[in-house]
Image (cartoon, grey):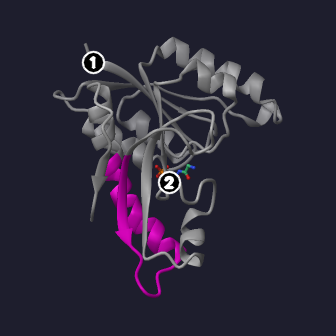
Amino acid sequence: MKKRVAILISGGGSNMEALVQDMDKTHPAEPVLVLSNTPDAGGLSKAEARGIPNVCVDHRPFKGDRVAFEAELTKALELAAPDIICLAGFMRILTPEFIERWQGKMLNIHPSILPLFRGLHTHKRALEAGMAVHGCTVHEVTGELDGGPILGQAVIPVKENDTESDLAERLLVQEHRLYPAVLRKFAAGDRTPITLFP
Ligand code: GAR
């Protein structure tokens, strides 16, 4: 039986689309839900266009009450009964309790070569640090922010005169290769890390 995948987004959802596109007949998993924490996430209409059940649990009415927000999130997720949750540009910090509930089942993609540049503004920080390479990481989600076992990394060269948006654009292409490759293996029970070069 195919594994059920829920994908959590906050924005354009290009990684979500890459994951969904890869989940063809031969894939060990299928998308069962796309969930956004903001109603204006472009990814919601992309999911709708692909006929994937989608829902918004807007975080704003909860006014910073993470526990109450996550209770709604959990309700929506439990209805979809996912075996795997993919965070794909989901920009909310999750509580240890929520992470514990889905421990071992939740993946995240982060736009840096972890453990370098946890948190935000990774492209800017890679440029400021004078890195010759930059990259992205898919990892299991644990209580440690942008920590957790690494399941795959892809790298790109940093070129002279690269701007933040140059890096973001080139890295996104690699994110779209890496995340589906990792999910395919993970859904089949294989957690050995993948490395991708451009
Ligand atoms: C991606 O670059 C992803 O790595 C990043 O947000 C972008 C989402 O783009 N995630 C994070 O920064 C998580 N800390 P998308 O909505 O087009 O997939």
The three-letter amino acid code for the residue at tag 2 is Leu
Image height check: is 32 above or below 50? above
For badge 1, the amino acid type reads Lys
Residue situated furthest bottom in the rendering: 161
Q: Is residue 108 above or below residue 70?
A: below
Instruction: Pick the residue in front: 144 or 71.
Output: 144
Question: In the structure shown, which secondary structural element does the residue marked by tag 1 occupy?
Answer: loop
Q: Which residue is mark 1?
A: 2
Residue 166 belongs to magenta span: yes
* Residue at figure coordinates x 38%, y 53% from the top left: 175
Asked whether, in this view, residue 56 is left or right of residue 155, the answer is right
Magenta-colored span: 152-178
- Quarter of the image where the C terminus is located: bottom left
Residue 78 at x, y = what percent?
54, 13
Q: Residue at x 32, y 31 (%)?
A: 186
Q: Which residue is mark 2?
A: 114
